[in-house]
Image (cartoon, rainbow, N blue to C red):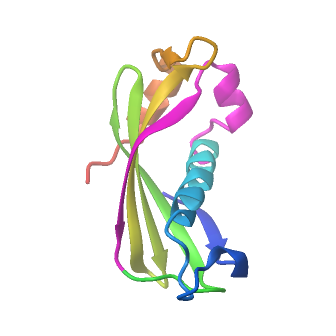
Amino acid sequence: MSVYQHRVRNHEVDSQGFLFNSRYLEVADVAMTEYFRAIGWPYPKLVAEGTDPSVVSATLSFRSPAYFDDLLDTDVTCTKVGTSSFQLDVCITRDQAEVAMIELIYVNVDATKARSRPIPEAVAQTLRNHIRPR
């Protein structure tokens, strides 16, 4: 599901003129928030329901560089839902050509206890309803 468009800003590029590698995770983070909004769970509602997702694993594969002023599209796909975790794949494209693929595994956490907790059933079911296998 296409959820977010990002224009590469000057301060995000490195000395080679490429979007700096860590910035892809920032783009993916915004895309995750917009994905949840698109499936009916805006972030304040998500947190109020007891969902506080934290990234525990990120795998980035770069296909081609993005440059200053490029307009990037992000497509987010839920590929797995467990008891306390889920996986989102974020495909970043420019003019429909893949720039990067990011696989993110999130765990729902109880921040006060610093440990995982189950994803609330209503949120988990919504995620399950949107699973698309790779």
In the depicted structure, whether residue 97 falls above or below residue 31? below
Pinpoint residue 91: horizontal percent, then vertical percent: 42, 64
Rendering quarter of residue 73: bottom right
**Residue stretch rendered in magenta on the structure:** 38-63
Please identify the residue farthest to the left as the structure is shown.
Answer: 134
Q: Residue at x 57, y 11 (%)?
A: 113
Q: Quadrant of residue 41?
A: top right
In the image, farthest residue toward the front = 15
Exactly how many numbered labels are in the figure?
Answer: 0
Q: Is residue 52 magenta?
A: yes
Residue at left 58%, top 61%?
Answer: 27
- The front one of 112 and 45 is 112
Quarter holding the C terminus?
bottom left
Instruction: Report whether 29 appears left or right of 78.
Output: right
Q: Is residue 125 magenta?
A: no
Residue 93 point in image, percent of width and height: 46, 75
Residue 62 % position (x, y) = 36, 72
| 100 to 102, vertically: above or below | below
In this image, 88 relative to 108: left or right? left
Q: Residue at x 62, y 46 (%)?
A: 33
Residue 63, how many percent across, how many down?
34, 77
Q: Residue at x 42, y 76 (%)?
A: 99
Name above or below for residue 110 compared with residue 85.
above
